[in-house]
Image (cartoon, grey):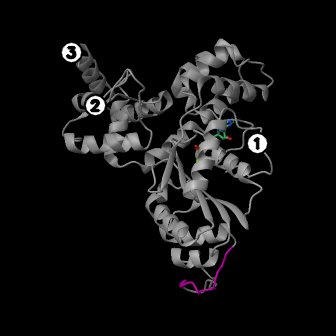
Amino acid sequence: MPEPLDGRSAALVGRDAEAIEVERLLREHRLVSVVGPGGVGKSALAADVVRRMLPGPWAAVAATDLAGLETPGQVPHWMACALRLWGRPRLAEVAGDRPRLPVVDTSEHLAEAVGDRPTLLVVDTCEHLAEECADVLVRLVEACAGMHVLVTSRVPLRTPAGYPLPPLAPEAAATLFSRAALRFGASVTPESELARRICTSLDGLPLAVHLAAGGLAHRTPDELLPFVSRLRHVLDLTSPVTPLPSRQRTLRASLSWSHRLCTPDERLLWARCSVFDEPFTLRDALAVCSDEWLAASPLVTAFAGLAAQSVITPEPPPHPAAFRMPRVTRAYGRQRLELLGEEDEFERRCAAWCVGGR
Ligand SMILES: Nc1ncnc2c1ncn2[C@@H]1O[C@H](COP(=O)(O)OP(=O)(O)O)[C@@H](O)[C@H]1O
Ligand SMILES: [Mg+2]
């Protein structure tokens, strides 16, 4: 995640209200998860909230990113490393001739090491270790009166407070695009038709907006719009100037990370639901996407899972019970459907269902 800086950030666009609310939740509940799809700005917001909470009474302020951690049992140790805490040294049970390291191997040991010191910790990218993180952090915050933890995750966590982070509002997304375009010497005002249309087609996802602006490195603004309109192109755009972790270097990489977190049923439903180009309900998904490989009951579970992971998002009124797949997510699902060889069949089924008046 971006380094927490002293003072207020000028870098974030359109997130004042969100940052104020997350800070309030964090002061009140001491453990808050910011949840949303990859690239929506969770890490950036968490860093901004930390900046806002500095200076404070903190004996320690730290941030750690769990993206590189694969072993659930190492979560307490990883957090202790972030806090540069070792507590009472214990000997790790490591095999062979590797050095014996002091480890913090349980949440109790971690809590003992933290004690009551006022501590502010950001734990970023928890989605692949959601259960373990929630367990460790809930216990830590219960045991340590001065501990405040802000967590980010693509999937909901069992924390006392959760904050679902929405995409940027259209004006903020256009401002972000305009600023990012300047880095390529392109002058695109936020009010321009180009900025508005590009940001709408990318559903206001900050990562997508940054990467689309990267397309200006080799194209004029007029050439960019038709290119971005074909969303499968956007999946592979990279930014030559924004340093991003490999998981976010392209939207395809970001979506693949989410795809790996899904169950096989969720992956299949993601691909099949990509045939809907209008908002759709669970009833529509059952009618169009179920078959012997994805029966009704597992489909209902998978539908809820995709909603929890923001692969599909609820539509605002007047569409009761309707969901939509964000455009870039849909482009990714569409390619998966092609790979499965199911595109024709499910397009046909969707068309027949829609013609039949649903
Ligand atoms: N509100 C914003 N203003 C400016 N840049 C943003 C904003 N939100 C996110 N970004 C940038 O977009 C990219 C993706 O954001 P990030 O916080 O890493 O997403 P997430 O953690 O949800 O996957 C990063 O380069 C980040 O700095
Ligand atoms: Mg992140």
**Highlighted magenta segment, given as a residue range:** 85-95
Density class for disc 3 (Cα within 10 Å; few <14, some 14-19, many ≥20) is few
Name the residue nearer the viewer: 214 or 281.
281
Horizontal and vertical percent position of residue 243: 72, 43
CA gap, disc 3 to disc 2? 15 Å
Residue type pointed to by label 1: Ser
Closer to the camera: disc 1 or disc 2?
A: 1
Residue type pointed to by label 2: Ala
Residue name at image x 70 percent, y 17 percent: 221
Direction from residue 9 to residue 194 in the image, left or right: left
Does label 3 or label 1 sit earlier along the sequence?
A: 1
Closer to the camera: disc 3 or disc 1?
A: 1
Residue 9 numbered mark, or none:
1
Does label 3 or label 2 sit earlier along the sequence?
A: 2
Direction from residue 9 to residue 157 in the image, left or right: left
Q: Are marks 3 and 1 in contact (CB under 8 Å)?
A: no
Residue name at image x 60 percent, y 23 percent: 170
| Residue 80 seen in this snapshot | yes
Horizontal and vertical percent position of residue 147: 61, 65
Give the residue pinned by disc 3.
356
Q: Quadrant of residue 289?
A: top left
- Of helix, strand and loop, which one carries label 1? loop
- Of helix, strand and loop, which one carries label 3? loop
Vertical arrangement, residue 88 with respect to residue 202, above or below: below
Residue type pointed to by label 3: Gly
Is the stretch drawn in magenta largely helix, strand or loop? loop
Give the residue pinned by disc 2.
285
